Amino acid sequence: MASSQHIYRTLRQEILSLALEPGQKLREEDLAARFSVSRTPVRAAISRLEAERLIRVEPRKGTFVSEIDLDYVRQLIFLRTSVELRMLPLLCREQPAALWEAMEENLARQKRLLEEGPEPSRFYRLDNRFHELYFSHLGMDAVWKLLQQFHVHYTRFRVLDMRQSGLFSQFYEEHRRQLDLLRAGGEEALSRLIVRHLESPLERVNRQNLQKESAASSSFVQNFS
């Protein structure tokens, strides 16, 4: 019999990987049957996910996977970019060989995944780990953990961007370029790259949303013209 913790972890991973889609309705009875439990541990798991803003519960309507809050994502990207712009010049000056080796190993894993046929959730984990390496090296583990606490919407957003854009090779090349610039001490070029790397996914998703809205508006006009 599954515990509340197991149900929470399973649903959380499915939400973050978009296996459970934003807006999708969840029924307690279905989840209880799936995990072979009563509704009590299901409700406990849902309560935790609601506290993380991954699930919204609407009285008399039901329980739904929360939509991705793009304004919240925008603010997180602003915070993340600001932090990294302060950190990366420190690495340019320090030139830590052990860190470069760890980042090279991560890049090798990214490249192998590209050759195998990338899956968004797996590639995102490597992408995230690439950045985490230099936070940890600089003794900024607490900063990284703090960022991760607010990353639930950002994680889904990035997986969505990867799934929609399919630009895995571009993401890999940007990471490759980032490490090359770190080694070369190219602070100005590195700053431009990290801004583009972190902010361009939001620009793509916003552009796609505008295109969808425009298409829907055109269809509405055609139907009533």
Image (spheres, rainbow, N blue to C red):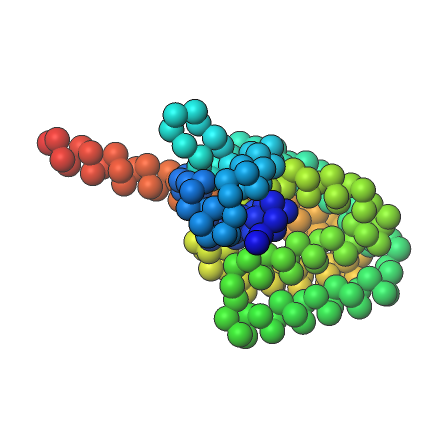
Left/right of residue 125 with respect to residue 185 in the rendered view: left
Left/right of residue 76 with respect to residue 63 in the rendered view: right
Query: Residue 76 in the image: x percent, y percent?
Result: 63, 37
Residue depicted at x 57% and y 34%: 47
Residue depicted at x 65% and y 70%: 109
Q: Nearer the viewer, residue 81 or 132?
A: 132
Query: Residue 89 in the image: x percent, y percent?
Result: 80, 48
Q: How many marks?
A: 0
Which part of the image, by quadrant, shows the C terminus? top left
Instruction: Name the residue at the left extreme.
Output: 225
Q: Is residue 72 visible?
A: yes
Residue depicted at x 81% and y 47%: 141
Residue depicted at x 55% and y 58%: 121
Q: Is residue 83 visible?
A: no
Which part of the image, by quadrant, shows the N terminus? bottom right
Left/right of residue 97 with respect to residue 170 in the rendered view: right
Instruction: Name the residue at the top extreme.
Output: 59
Query: Residue 160 in the image: x percent, y percent?
Result: 48, 50
Left/right of residue 84 with respect to residue 25 in the rendered view: right
Q: Height in image: 96 above or below 11? A: below
Q: Height in image: 98 above or below 68? A: below
Q: Quadrant of residue 143?
A: top right
Query: Residue 223 in the image: x percent, y percent?
Result: 13, 35
